[in-house]
Amino acid sequence: MTTMSTPAAQRPRATMKHVAALAGVGVKTVSRVINDEPNVTPATAERVWNAVRELDYQLDLQAGSLRRADGRTRTLGLLVGSVDNPFAGAIHRAVEDIAAARGVAVFASSMDDDAGRESEAVRAFLQRRVDGLILTTASDHPEYLSLLRDRGLPVVYVDREPMESDVDTVASDNRAGAAAGTAHLVAHGHRRIALLTDRLDLVTARERRLGYLDALAQAGIPVSEELIVTGLHDAKDAAAALGRLLSSHEPPTAVFSAQNLITIGALHALRDAGRSHSVALVGFDDVALADLLDPGVTVVAQDPQQIGARAADRVFARLEGVEDSPSRIVVPVRLITRGSGEIEPPERS
């Protein structure tokens, strides 16, 4: 009699219970091994991984790493503020271009500046056994940092970085850029300059606020707290905030908006108030079609493509053992004048 084996495609999908039974351990032990948790002996871990290989367990998440001698999955995890923000989208594309040339796939996720969602995304990346991480953080002290150190996983932070000094980061020169944008408004005669910025628990918002204050101090202009609006997260918030300032007893003659979505909100407020040609505006980070508006929008432009590319290069250098000490890479910004930042105050014009 001839016996026929069941084709692999027709076999029932293996479960964690099957792996545990074959390895002679409990289901919890299998979970610890697969998720790279501590308190499992090397001999036990080896039995579990042998069972996983034999049963092709969780093929969609881990089979690639199981079949490669180096244990690599040829994947990276990328966490950005929001994938619908053009700045984040440009970083994503640059990382993908570098990774694709090496045959590596990129898993991308948004955190929406939520520390809880950030931690969940990082843990999801780890469960998929990515080879490295490129992260934007919403926290000065992410709670998962010790976990990443224990894993020894290459990690590079982009745009925003934790307060810890021993991490790889690639970021724009936020403080100097904000100072240059504000100083540009001062040079055109403005003394009542509003600052619209994000939450100050975000390092980028703090740095850009400091740059704004640096420029005022350099020019000998007293700080007017009523002109500083923080905690703005999107264009709607920014439009409402600037609308209130424009209708106040002493409205600003110029605005420095410290984030691209905030700049869009500022443009709406200026248009609605009929002040687009009488109140100057400089935005931090470029916005789509900024050169086609009337007036064109003057911006302090970041280089998200370079940020993403240098972050990806750094991760691969870590993976290949080329780099082993943390570094902070600062990507320069540049002022692009288009018209809105060159409007002079009423008394000067």
Image: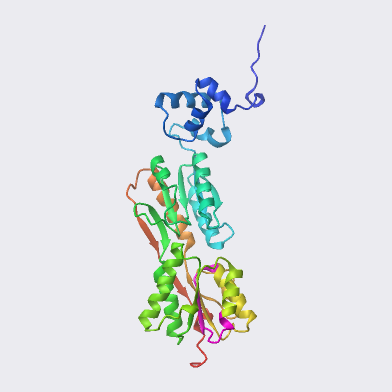
- Taking the image as shown, residue 244 lies to the left or right of residue 130, namely right
Residue 232 spot, x, y in % from top left: 54, 68
Which image quarter: residue 162?
bottom left
Residue 195 spot, x, y in % from top left: 49, 75
Q: Is residue 203 visible?
A: yes
Residue 76 drawn above or below residue 58: below
The residue lying at 53 percent from left, 86 percent from top is 250
Residue 295 spot, x, y in % from top left: 58, 81
Residue 208 drawn above or below residue 247: above
Residue 204 drawn above or below residue 320: below
The residue lying at 66 percent from left, 14 percent from top is 4
- Taking the image as shown, residue 90 lies to the left or right of residue 140, namely right
The number of numbered discs placed on residues in the rendered structure image is 0
35 inside magenta stretch: no
Q: Which quarter of the rendering shows the N terminus?
A: top right
252 inside magenta stretch: yes
Q: Residue furthest top?
A: 1
Is 18 in front, or is 303? 18
Residue 280 spot, x, y in % from top left: 52, 82
Q: Is residue 292 visible?
A: no
Is 35 in front, or is 66? 35
How is the model colour-coded?
rainbow
The residue lying at 36 percent from left, 57 percent from top is 328
Q: Which residues are magenta?
A: 245-260
